[in-house]
Image: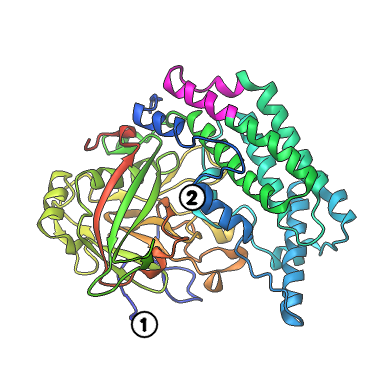
Amino acid sequence: MMALTLRGLPSCAVHSPRLGPSSSSPHRRPGASTVAAAATRRSSSSIDALGAGVVETELRRSSSGSGEDTGTDGGGGGRMARGVVSGTLATIMAVSPVLATTIAAIGFAVPPSAEAALSNPNTRLPRNGVTALRRAVPVINPEASEVQYKLEEAAYLLRIPQRKPWGQMSDDVKKSLVIVRDKRVTLLQPVPVGEARNAAESTLGELDQLLTELGTIAGAQDVERFDRGLAMALDATSRLRVLQAPGLPFDVPRRYVDLPRLTGRATVDLTVRKGGTGTFGFVNGDEVNTAKLRVVVDGYNAPLTAGNFVDLVQRGFYNNCDLKRSDTALLVDTKSGGAATAAAAAAADVVDGVVDGEGGVVVLGKSPREQLPLEVKPMDGYEPRYRSPLNVMGAEELPTLPLSVNGALAMARGAEDGTSSPTQFFVYQFDKRSAGLGGMAFEEGEFSVFGYVVQGEEEGFLAQLRTGDTIVKAEVVLGADRLVNGAR
């Protein structure tokens, strides 16, 4: 495989923990397009009338577990499976001691804490983009966060093989339903009056119906339908929490106040085309050479990086840009976009300088956007940290938007320490086999992650992209109204 040497990307070496030197707004109401999409996302909330899109993606991932190997073959495979299960259960008990009785009752032994720390992945680290985005919504309303926590706990317990703790899972659903019904006014209070409030009320009604059905399904111990319903309920809860957060809960530093920023989330579609005679295979009976990757860009936790990206997409900067693939990343070659990309960059004031020979990173010049600051928000922090990476390995700080997720979008490193490239982004190809302790990438906390692929990964499109394939078009399909100081 061709090894790329593009500066600023994650290393392909398994044992290389670092890539080089690193140095240490007012609320806005959601626009009509954002609210309308949330209100009409699903015509039926019945568990047996499962919708498409993100929910289907979540279901496939949920049913397959957290992505860890749980082989059931004899000998070493069986021992590995038992080790993963017991380690996972130890972590559950650490997070929620009330589960100790249930877990002990079903006959699982829990390893000592030191052994557990070495034998299981960090459960705070999501394993797919949908889950990462759900957990990254700002906590505006504690009651909504509690509902999400209870449902995620039930989903986690559902992955226990054989004897599942249906009593605890049913209790999680019942407690969530009580909150939805008894705290309705409190849940709606943060949502602005108008279309957003109408969407939130509709979502609450949907969630009430789903939780009611889940209670019955739990009594019947129907694993498949319970799994499906949990995914739908978690999706509805996530949409409610987004409606509760109409803007940034913090102000960006004054020195960056004139840069584009995203005060929420936006959805971007990347239409990609295979190079030469390559195809993505057959879709609905037809062989296709183009596919769509849908990404959600998160301004809640990376407002400057997300805003910069959405601004460039709006200007057509990434149209007709070629892709380059390494072992760990799918890089967008911004040099290949031609005149259209150059014109868009000039309009965005990011090419007041020269272009580096490695990967098209813009350096030098006097443009205010030639040095986009590194932007990483700690999971337990209130606001992002600028120009300073997180010490993930040493201090056990985790970013709210982790890199260690397949399909994570991040900006390449900038020309100076503590900066990101203003134009060149990559899609991370996470491989747990090359991850460090806790299932984390060695470069975790060192890049500005700003979103995730939410459609196109499970379908296999993302994995099929190779050097020479092209982004034909990048288009903002939702959330452009959240962009401040950028192109409309």
Tell me which segment is drawn in magenta: 186-205
What x and y, as percent, mark residue 339? Answer: 9, 56
Q: Residue at x 53, y 33 (%)?
A: 241
Q: Residue at x 71, y 63 (%)?
A: 117
Q: Residue at x 49, y 48 (%)?
A: 54
Quarter of the view holding residue 267:
top left
Quarter of the view holding residue 215:
top right
Residue 38 is left or right of residue 419, and the answer is right
> Do the residues under discs 2 and 1 have CB atoms within 8 angstroms?
no
Q: Quadrant of the N terminus?
A: bottom left
Instruction: Give the overall secondary structure of the magenta segment.
Output: helix
Q: Residue at x 72, y 53 (%)?
A: 223
Q: Which residue has dot 1 on it?
A: 1
277 falls in the magenta region: no
Mark drawn on residue 401:
2
| Residue type (three-letter) at the residue carrying disc 2 | Leu
